[in-house]
Image (tube, rainbow, N blue to C red):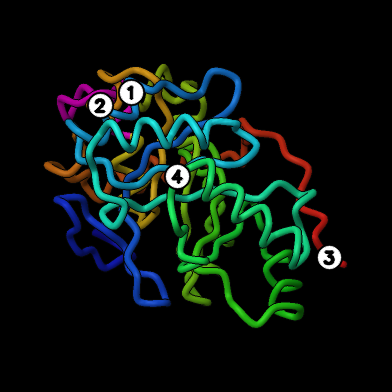
Amino acid sequence: MSACELGKAQGMPTVPLSNGFSIPVLGLGTSHDGGYSHDAVVYALQKCGIRHIDTAKRYSCESLLQKAIKESGIKREDLWLTTKLWHTDYGYEKTKQAYLESCKRLGIEYLGLCRSIGVSNFLIDHLEQLKEDCRVTPHVNQVEYHPFQRPQELVDYCRSRNIVFEGYCPLAKGEALNHSNIVQLAKKYGRTPAQICIRWSIQNGIVTIPKSTKPERIWENCQVFDFNLEKEDMEFLDSMNINRKVIHLTYPLWKG
């Protein structure tokens, strides 16, 4: 697998971080506005081998995840859990309090306190500013990544600083599933368009976190470790980049 060394944890390939921990290369994303399903999370943990769940305070599902994790029977030490601060929680005391509140809602004793620290939606300029103000280099940068939005300069920058690049929205909010080029590749490999997109992302060395609330889709999204895309097909998918984002953000104003 290109651009990353992979190990194994609970049967799921992992990517090493600069602090010695390893993050599962495939995770389950959650979100607000209907982006959470209790049954789907339990299914992902029990039946699909998912050991990486991504959430955030803003999504308002941390307490719901606590119930799903307990029901799944998966031990805390076997899970990689990511949550995120909201911008109103910036600052040492606020951050610490927000962290403790997230732990309480999730029903866990640690998110590492914090064992691994990441950022989300940071561009090179943001990471350069962070380097001036902070002693810890982020272990992960989580950014939108799919065939229409492949920020390779940012990926390369992160790798030059041993920051693992994590890609969300790998299916471009479903838009990639109907693209004729991706559909054609799916037919070639006997796979689904979703599996082609996720496999492409992982083969590019990206920690990938597709989101779904449907158990059958989660199962489908996890069946990507028994085939490889050929070099010319990887390059073809790479060439589809048009810098088109499907998530529009106000970038973090954390300076000061």
Observer-nearest of 178 and 168: 168
Q: Are marks 4 and 2 in contact (CB under 8 Å)?
A: no
Q: Which residue is mark 4?
A: 107
Q: Judge left or right: residue 79 versus residue 110.
A: left
Q: Which residue is mark 2?
A: 43
Residue 162 as seen in the image, left or right of residue 252: left
Check disc 3 and report its element: helix, strand or loop. Answer: loop
Question: What amino acid is at disc 1?
Answer: Ala
- Marks 3 and 2, Cα distance to the nearest angstrom? 41 Å
Q: Secondary structure at mark 2?
A: helix
- Quadrant the C terminus occupies: bottom right
Q: Which mark is residue 255?
A: 3
Q: Which badge, 3 or 2, is on the more N-terminal residue?
A: 2
Q: CA distance from mark 1 to mark 4?
A: 19 Å
For the point 75% across and 53% down, the residue is 89
Instruction: Name above or below for residue 191 compared with residue 12.
Output: above
Q: CA distance from mark 2 to mark 1?
A: 5 Å
Contact check, label 2 and label 1, Cβ < 8 Å: yes
